[in-house]
Image (cartoon, rainbow, N blue to C red):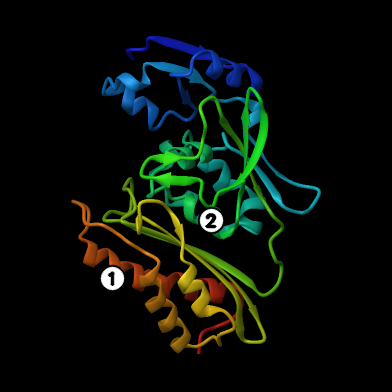
Amino acid sequence: MFDFESYHRATGIADATALLAQHPQARLLAGGTDVLIQLHHHNARYRHVVDIHGLAALRGIEMTDAGGLRIGSGTTFTELIESPLVRQHLPALSAAAASIAGPQIRNVATYGGNICNGATSADSATPSLIYDATLEIASASGTRFTSVNGFHTGPGSVALEAGEILVAFHFPPQPTSGAGSAHFKYAMRDAMDIATIGSAARCLIKDGKFDELRLAFGVAAPTPIRCLHAEQAAQGAPLTQQTLAAISEAVLQDVSPRSSWRAAKEFRLHLIQTMTRKVVSEAVENAGEKLQ
C-alpha cells in the first residue's frame, strides 16, 4: 500500500493541468517506474499525485503534414521499438529504447517520463538531441513549444514550470539520402542497468565529406549534451580515420564527467573517446559510406 496523501486521476490533458493548478505540490504519475519507487521509499515529496497514466491524448506516433513525426509523451518504449515509423525515420531513438532496462519496464515506462525525470543517464535524451526534438508543453494557461536542447537544466532538473505537462515530441523531417545515425550505450551489465556513458550520432554526408555531424552524450556532464566542438571538427572534413581521431580529441572540450561509484572520471573520459569513434563510425556506415 502506497502512502498517498492525495490522489487524482486525470481524464484528459486539460483536466490534468487543472488538477496541477489546484494541487501545485502534486507529482505526475505516468509509467510509474520512477514515481512508484519514490512512494515505496516514503519520499514525502511524492505524497500528492496526479495520475496521467494511459491518457489517449498523450499516446501515439504519427506523421505530420510536413513529413516529420509527432510522438506522444505517454508513448511507451515498447511502442517506440515496435513502431515502423520510428525505425525508419528515427532509428537511433528505436535503438535507445531497446537498450532500456527489460521488457517489463519498457512496457510501462514512457518517453516523456524518461526525459522529464531530468537524469543525465536518460537513454532517450541523446537521440532526442541529435534529431532536434521540439517539446510540446501544456498548462492551464495554454501551450508552448521549446527545444529539447537546453531543456535539461541540471542534475534531476528540467525546464518545466509548475503546472506544466510535456504532451508530445515533434521531430522535423529527416534527410532521406546521405544520412545515417546510431546509438550506443555502455553499462556494466547488459540488462537492467543505468548507462555508465550513453551516446548518439547523426551525420549528413556529401561528396565524401561530413556535411554535418551531430553528436550527443549522456552521463558525460551534469545534463545530456550536444558536443559542439566535436561536431565542428567534422564540418567539411573527409571521411578518414584522421578526421575520426580529430573528432574524438575535440570531444574532450565538450564533456565534464565526474567520478562516482559506477566509474572513475578517467575511465569515463576513455569511454567517451572510444564511444565517439564507435558511434560516429556506425552512423557513417548507416549512411552507406565508410571511413577510409
Query: Left or right: 235 with respect to 5?
Result: right
Marking on residue 134 = none
- Judging by the rendered image, the residue that carries numbered circle 1 is 270
Task: Residue under label 2, please give it.
Answer: 129
Query: Across the whole image, how many numbered discs are drawn on residues?
Result: 2
Amino acid at pointer 2: Leu
Which numbered disc flags the more N-terminal residue, 2 or 1? Answer: 2
Q: Nearer the viewer, residue 147 or 97?
A: 147
Residue 112's x, y, as percent? 53, 38
Which element type, helix, strand or loop, lies under badge 2? helix
Image quadrant where residue 45 sits: top left
State the residue lying farthest toward the right: 65
Residue drawn at (36%, 64%), measured in percent from left and top? 255
* Farthest-out residue, top: 5
Residue 213 is situated, as x and y percent measured from the top left of the image, at: 56, 72
Q: Position of residue 19 (x, y in %)?
A: 56, 15
Residue 213 higher or lower than 144, as above or below: below
Q: Is residue 279 above or below residue 206?
A: above
Placement of 115 over or under 292, stated as above or below: above
- Using the numbered discs, state the Cα–Cα distance from disc 2 to disc 1 in whole angstroms: 22 Å
**Residue at the spot x=52%, y=75% of the render?**
232
* Residue type pointed to by label 1: His
Could you say which quadrant of the image residue 174 lies in? bottom right
Answer whether labels 2 and 1 touch (C-beta < 8 Å). no
| x, y percent for residue 27 | 44, 23
Is 217 left or right of 283, judged from the image as shown?
left
Task: Between residue 243 and residue 80, name the one nearer to us.
Answer: 243
Q: Residues within 10 Å of mark 2 (few under 14, many from 20)?
A: many
Q: Residue at x 50, y 12 (%)?
A: 8
Which residue is painted at 28% across and 53% down in the image?
189
